[in-house]
Image (cartoon, grey):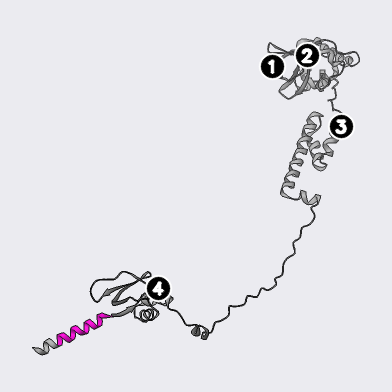
Amino acid sequence: MLRRWFFEICLCAAFAFAFKGFAGEYYCTNGEVIKGDPISFKEEGVVFKKDSGGYTDTIQWPSFTQETLKVLAESKDPYAQYYAEPFIEIPLEDLKAKTVKPPPRIVVAEVDRVASYHPAPGFLSAWLTPAGLLILVSLYAGNLVAGYSIARFRRKQPALVCGISAILPVVGPAIFMVQPEQAPAPVEVFEEELTDQPEAKELVASTGASALTKTMTRAATVKDSAAAGYEPAIYKKGDITFNRRFFETKFPTFFRPVLGQKEKTVMFVINEGGKFHEGIRFSRVTTGEIYLVPMAGVGEISISIAAIDSVEVKPR
């Protein structure tokens, strides 16, 4: 029985010694002595469990003496060693004994530098930029459009004028612009030629020679009027076939923007299905429409050629 009690007492003493850990005396710089076991190691300090019972407040690391810090740093707790070592002072002799490696020397080597090249800007290099090429393309397209407009205005072939304008920009349109307007050549109609055509034979057979005679008389009147002005005349649908060729042949000088002295003495009255239009000249003509400039000289009136009943030329 005594042996059993003795064994239990020795076992308790061994457990007490094992769990005592860091139990001992720890000295502070202010002369305070802490008796107990450290139970918590933090960055702020250490908390001890007193032998007399209870716990201490957190004791900061700088408050311990160097001997106490070394004792705590030599403990098996990794946190105690980690937090205590920064506060342990190393003697100057130990610092001198340590071999301090000099920092590596940084050698700045010379590098090959490419010399910057800034050529003086020239006239040709400015046009080879994207903006310059865009301007050139725009000018070239405008040159072709100008050539087409000049061809319509001067009564030239648009394909010819645009082709020359494409080869000779600016110069080509200028050449055609200074040329006089090309008026359509008048067509001379002879009685023998008219009578040889089937339509003319039918016209003579149905209406006699009077309609043919009127046509020839009016053509001669317009031809002779070049020297003595234009005489009044009326062209009716039954006697005349109204088409583009009729207006270009009978009134070629009335398509000019500026009328001559003889053309300014007459005016046109066109009957379009009972609706009368008065004007001084023609602006243009197509296959199906004739455009008449009104008396005011501003704008144009579109008239269907198929709906024209009569064309009257009379003095103003």
- Which of labels 1 and 2 is toward the front? 2
In which quarter of the view is residue 156 placed? top right
What is the magenta range? 7-21
Cβ atoms under marks 1 and 3 closer than 8 Å:
no
N-terminal of the pair, mark 4 or mark 3, is 4
Cα–Cα gap, marks 4 and 3: 107 Å
Majority SS type along the magenta span: helix
- Residue ID at (14%, 88%): 6
Q: Which of marks 1 and 4 is nearer the N terminus?
A: 4
Mark 2–mark 3 Cα distance, whole angstroms, equals: 30 Å
Circle 2 — which element?
strand
What residue does disc 2 label?
A: 268
* Residue 115 x/y as whole percent: 75, 64
User: Of the residues tagged 1 and 4, which is closer to the observer?
Assistant: 4
Decide: is 135 above or below 41.
Answer: above
Residue identifier under label 3: 178
